[in-house]
Image (spheres, coloured by chain):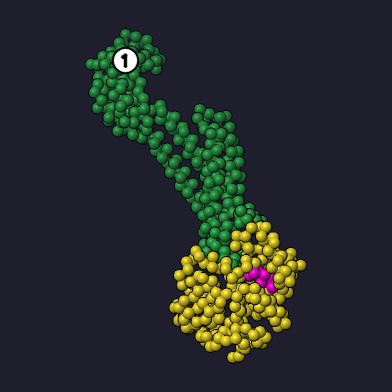
Chain colours: A green, B yellow
Amino acid sequence: MNRIGYYFREGVDSIFNHGLISFATVCVIVACLLIMGSFASVALNVNHIISGLEGQVSLLALVDDSWSEEEARSIESQLLAVDNVSSVTFVSRAEALEEYLGQLEESELFDEVEPDILRDRFLVYMEDVALMAGTQEQVRHVPGIAKVNAHLGIAQGMVSVRRVVNIVSIAMIVLLLAVSVFIMSNTLRLAAFTRRNEVAIVRMMGASNGFIRGPFNVEGMILGFTGALIAFLFQWALYSAVINWISASSLSFLQIIPFSVMAVPLLVCFLAIGLLVAIFGSRIAIRNYMRI
Amino acid sequence: MISLEHVYKSYENGTVAIEDVSFSMEDGEFAFLVGPSGSGKSTIIKLLTGEIASTEGRVVVNGYDMGTISRRRLPALRRTLGIIFQDFRLIENRNVYENVALAMHVYGAKNSEIKKRVPYVLGLVGLQERMWEMPRELSGGQQQRVAIARALANNPRTIIADEPTGNIDPELSAQLMTLLSKISQQGTTMLVVTHEHDLVNQFAQRVIRIVNGRVASDSKGWYQE
């Protein structure tokens, strides 16, 4: 406990001894976390929106027209047993015709048309639309299914958008994390340099590496946590402003994740990143002083 | 306890610093380690504090075999030592109290112990009244006494003083050496490195003389080239 108190006193003293550098470090951490958080927020929302759209994408499995409606309905359990199928909806010939006519402006021209010209069908929903082609193939082999229509292009497009957004976000997060560690290590390196005589003296007194690292770890953690908290508040304000702008614009149909849902995970991530940056930064900064 | 048995040290550039050095000191013994500049005294100090390892031979300090000690155990060895340097090595931006207390923080002492012990050891060196002053406000002799108090703070088994009087005037040097001698009488092994003949000759103590990296003499009494 005494040592922890000592580390805190030393760490806090060092922050104020290099006030300007400490301030600059916090600013850089705030900027990096804010950009990281913004990319992560965009990625999460794109995933959320695409997941919603993917839930509406389905395969259209047409039943052999020689099968009666009762026979056709019996296929449902076999379709549900197919890998990647989450749910199926049966649409009878009559319902299919009604739906088709509903889309036409002059449907009275088709009044004489009998439902028999259409087939019973299933709308097959999937857990993962990226696997649509494989699922289409398996559904095609279910007895009684004559044909399976799939909008593979749309599914592929959604998968591609999701993948690009995820890759860009992860790349930005990694890059900004590295920048944060670099900046933090430079600040702590300066602190270590100004205290190099003291480090040499306590080393000869029998200080362990842990004792020497302690104040630098505390300094890094305080800077990291301060940066994380400020970045969180800025992120909150920025996110709220963007939500307000979207809801007032023509994009208001987009299902944006409320900040309240993201707040706790985001804060935990920011604090964890702040801690990570502090630990790695201090390790890099004082490794030259760890030689006995 | 200090023991060196047939110790050699040569550096990577081929310089042989010491050759076949052997001597030992019992607990509570006082000895001067003397010799001209470049004779190998500093090498012996570095071997004793674990800053360097011997090329050959055996070095044992307070029960730690320096040939086999791991890097992780080295701080534990150093916490059994008190080291006094010629240039005092006080931390300039800390007051006298904090400089001494730092040694106890390293040791992991409780705050309550530190509050009691620091004024006590500063009292031993006659600086209790000045414990809130900064090192730069003290004379050279006073700064060295702070360094002695710091070395005493953890009640070490052995004190190694490397030219402790090198930066202070002769009169103060004698006072300081008397202080170290008194401390030794309390049971602390004391190895004092110096090249000051006159000072050594004021004390009838053991003198280990190093010349050209070898022990030239080891006897009680006088120091003569």
Q: Is residue B57 left or right of residue A259?
A: left
Viewer-side residue, B13 vs A139: B13
Question: Which region of the structure is painted magenta?
Answer: B145-152
Q: Nearer the viewer, residue B133 or B63?
A: B63
Is B73 placed left or right of A140 in the picture?
right
Residue linked to disc 1: A93
Q: Position of residue B197 (x, y in %)?
A: 64, 87
- Magenta segment, prevailing SS (helix, strand or loop): helix
Q: Residue at x 49, y 82 (%)?
A: B21
A189 w.r.t. A164: above or below? below
Q: Position of residue B206 (x, y in %)?
A: 60, 83
Residue A195 visible from this viewpoint? yes
Residue A20 forms part of the magenta stretch: no
Q: How many marks?
A: 1
In the rendered image of this protein, does residue B210 appear above or below residue B123? below
Q: Is residue A178 left or right of residue B203?
A: left
Q: Residue at x 30, y 28 (%)?
A: A82
